Amino acid sequence: MKAKYDFRVMPNLQGKEEELGLYPQLVTSGTITMKDLMERASRHSGFNPAEVLGIVTFLEDAMVEYLSQGYHVKLGDIGTFSAGLTSRKVMSKEEIRANSVHFDNVHFKADKKFRKKIGMEMKLERVEPYRAFQTSSDEYTPEERFQLLMAHLDANGFITCKKYSEITGLLKNKASAELRKWAEEGRISREGRVPHVMYLKKGIS
């Protein structure tokens, strides 16, 4: 699968439109969740999903412990995590008070080998103009989208996330989230595994 990209206008501090340039930016293909990774790990290894979840939970807890103690955590050739601090603005060290310094964020620095692997794997293509950096359409309310969904299921028997995105105007990640939500609520049924998931009317399989 090729990654999609398009061009955006480069900000210009002087505000002179004629000097503005364009820069390439990836258009997201969606979000891979922990559940998706667990299912993939289960398919491609001898571990079942519960074992994968146990390993990931242990890793998360261990990282929290070490990062909170001031350690850097290096995950193989993926990269290194570190904790960052912040405080109110001061002009000299004498102004600093311990209670004004606190945790700010977690920083991640990708390993050189990891970046190289991504660069070698990545294949790019320009995104379709009508999909570039769009927001999801608000043409329909959630209930109107559900009615569109039911009409499609009545006519076709099933629907994919891609097709639901097309008929509702939602971007793929939001279309996927909405379909999953309705499946979890029991309003529709979900069959298959990522990336071959389809949705059906409740009670039909």
Image: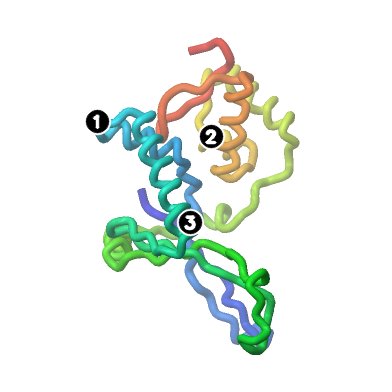
Residue situated furthest top in the rendering: 203
Circle 1 — which element? Answer: loop
**Label 2 CA crowd tier, 10 Å (few <14, some 14–19, many 20+):** some
Q: Position of residue 49 (x, y in %)?
A: 37, 30
Task: Tell me what residue is drawn at x 48 percent, y 69 percent.
Answer: 24
* Residue corresponding to mark 2: 163
Circle number at residue 46 = 1
**Label 1 CA crowd tier, 10 Å (few <14, some 14–19, many 20+):** few
Circle 3 — which element? Answer: loop
Is the residue 144 above or below the residue 55 in the image?
A: above
Quarter of the view holding residue 54: top left
Q: Position of residue 158 (x, y in %)?
A: 52, 22
**Label 3 CA crowd tier, 10 Å (few <14, some 14–19, many 20+):** some
**Marks 3 & 2, CB-CB < 8 Å contact:** no
Q: Is residue 203 left or right of residue 96?
A: left
Task: Tell me what residue is drawn at x 61 percent, y 78 percent.
Answer: 11
Q: CA distance from mark 3 to mark 1?
A: 37 Å
Q: Position of residue 28 (x, y in %)?
A: 50, 53
Q: CA distance from mark 3 to mark 2?
A: 18 Å
Q: CA distance from mark 1 to mark 2?
A: 34 Å
Q: Earlier in the sequence, mark 1 or mark 2?
A: 1
Q: Amino acid at mark 1?
A: Gly
* Residue corresponding to mark 3: 127
Q: Is residue 84 left or right of residue 71?
A: right
